Image (tube, rainbow, N blue to C red):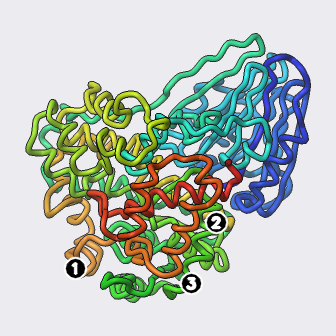
Amino acid sequence: MCGLSGEFRRDGSRADVSAVERMAATMSDRGPDDGGVWSQGRVALGHRRLKIIDLSAASGQPVVDPGAGLTGVFNGCIYNYRELRAELQSRGHRFFSSGDSEVVLKAYAEWGTDFVDHLVGMFAVAITERATGRLVLARDRLGIKPLYLTETPTTVRFASTLPALLAGGGVDTTIDRVALAHYLSFHSIVPPPRTILRGVAKLPPATVRVYEPDGRVDERIYWSPSFLRVPERADWTERDWQDALSDSLTTAVRRRMVADVPVGVLLSGGLDSSLVVALLAGEGQRDLSTFSIGFDAVGGREGDEFRYSDVVAKTFGTDHHQIRVAAQDLVGPLEAAVGAMAEPMVSHDCVAFYLLSQEVAKHVKVVQSGQGADEILGGYHWYPPLARVDRDAALDTYASAFFDRDAAGLARVLDPAWLADGDPAREFVAGHLSRPGAETAVDAGLRLDTQIMLTDDPVKRVDNMTMAHGLEARVPFLDHEFVELAATCPPELKLAQGGKGVLKEIGRRVLPHEVIDRPKGYFPVPGLTHLEDKLLDRVHDALTAPEARRRNLFRSDYVKNLLDAPNAELTPLNGNKLWQLGLLEMWLQSHGID
């Protein structure tokens, strides 16, 4: 897990090495252990390294392979790198390191842009060919590792974070009106390739893009799971599905133990992370370090779930760490979490993950986490209503449960100058839900959340907050083979028992019953749902700052009404609407965007 940066000159001039160095320097938190810069002609690459596999200097980056005429930078982890290395050696490739970074480069040398089909893991990659001068960018199937871009007629720059691109200079920081509509409607999710800034894009997941020196750009999507029933599994019983998914998830957890440093688990006490602990124990993992976080109750809302995480820790004999955060301590961490966001994210889980990662990084450099299970296996409350409607009614059902605002609501919030044409979020979701390849309305909703919401909310949140402390987070529920299998599972098995029924049955084999048959939990930060005292003051300051007044994104009367009654308006997902506006301004101001 690391941070990468780079520049590709379309006009044939020499790449700006100093800009690439500046971009890489902003990512020292993502890669605190080492760094490097390489340039040749029109291409320059930068890197910050977090040492997880092959701790020696031989796996430093950028990786240069003179024999193959390739240079590359890589962020992520390839879990099958040992198997790939052996296969590549059998094909005549020689290695100078024992890590996964060189395996990525050699895989490209062997298979060209099809190299991504051979990689099992999470990755963002940039590779340049000496002979042709082309640049190849690629991102993993579920978008676990980020890759941002800014392009002009003469230059392409790319980096693991949006703020890194800002450090390179020359970025159009105008707010994208369509992205703004997504942010305020689609629960802060801005689907790729857009970001909140007009001049920055993100490479979509499961995408390989090739920039040629003559100006041509080729792109392909190399993976998209089918959400249709598979004929050869038509006679599977519930037990068959449980066994198959259990075996696949066990494989996913085992794969993510690959490291030359200890691996821990972020243990919320919920089913998902608890099952990861149980499966690791079943694989013979001993003295496993687990970590949980809790906050003071605010406004009558509980702020910790220690009673559940403690049960799991005791059952499996883990080295468990409880992290307690007092309510008055949140302003500083909030500022730090906002600074660590590559894009503005409203979820108050960000602060929890930031603080948890800060503590965890004192003990381990790698953790497994339970993110993704709800999207993959039907754990959210908006899926059962989808089971009661046909595909053509999926849009209204989904939007009523998930959207923060409709077009009329946007008009009440935004200054008219910032209103986009139409209803961008609704139009995007309508297009995605209506695509072929999903059998039912539930399948279509799960596909949307797996390929869009998951990537640009919980996955991005975990990446940003853990990497702010040089901590690598691995997500076994997003193993692409597990996702492929789960996508074909009948929706009724997923939605049983109030959601994730098939996973609950797997859990009953290995987990204490009170962890399974509990109310659905979350990473609770009550102070950001019920705004008061210092946190409310901070939101007020952000929305009334000179930068906010100059930007004038929001109607002043609407902001005033929210500030007068800060906890009166909530979204369908119980998000605080004042917080949503305040967070956006805090993020823009934190990153120096006027």
What secondary structure is marked by label 1?
A: helix
The residue labelled by disc 3 is: 329
Q: CA distance from mark 3 to mark 2?
A: 22 Å
Q: Position of residue 417 (x, y in %)?
A: 49, 35
Camera-near label (3 vs 1) is 3
Q: Looking at the image, which residue is at 53% across and 74% down?
A: 537
> Relative to 63, does residue 150 appear above or below in the rendering?
above
The residue labelled by disc 2 is: 471
Q: Which mark is residue 513?
A: 1
Residue 541 in view, yes or no:
yes
Pick whichever of labels 3 and 2 is earlier in the sequence.
3
Pick whichever of labels 3 and 1 is earlier in the sequence.
3
**In the displayed structure image, the side of residue 523 where residue 320 appears, left or right:** right
Q: Looking at the image, which residue is at 54% across and 53% down?
A: 344
Pick whichever of labels 2 and 1 is earlier in the sequence.
2
Q: Looking at the image, which residue is at 23% across and 59% down?
A: 500
Q: CA distance from mark 3 to mark 1?
A: 34 Å
What secondary structure is marked by label 3?
A: helix
Q: Position of residue 155 (x, y in %)?
A: 77, 25
Residue situated furthest front in the rendering: 557
Residue situated furthest left in the rendering: 388
Judge the density around disc 3: few (<14), some (14-19), many (≥20) Cα neighbours within 10 Å. few
Q: Position of residue 91 (x, y in %)?
A: 69, 30
Pointers 2 and 1 in contact (CB under 8 A)? no
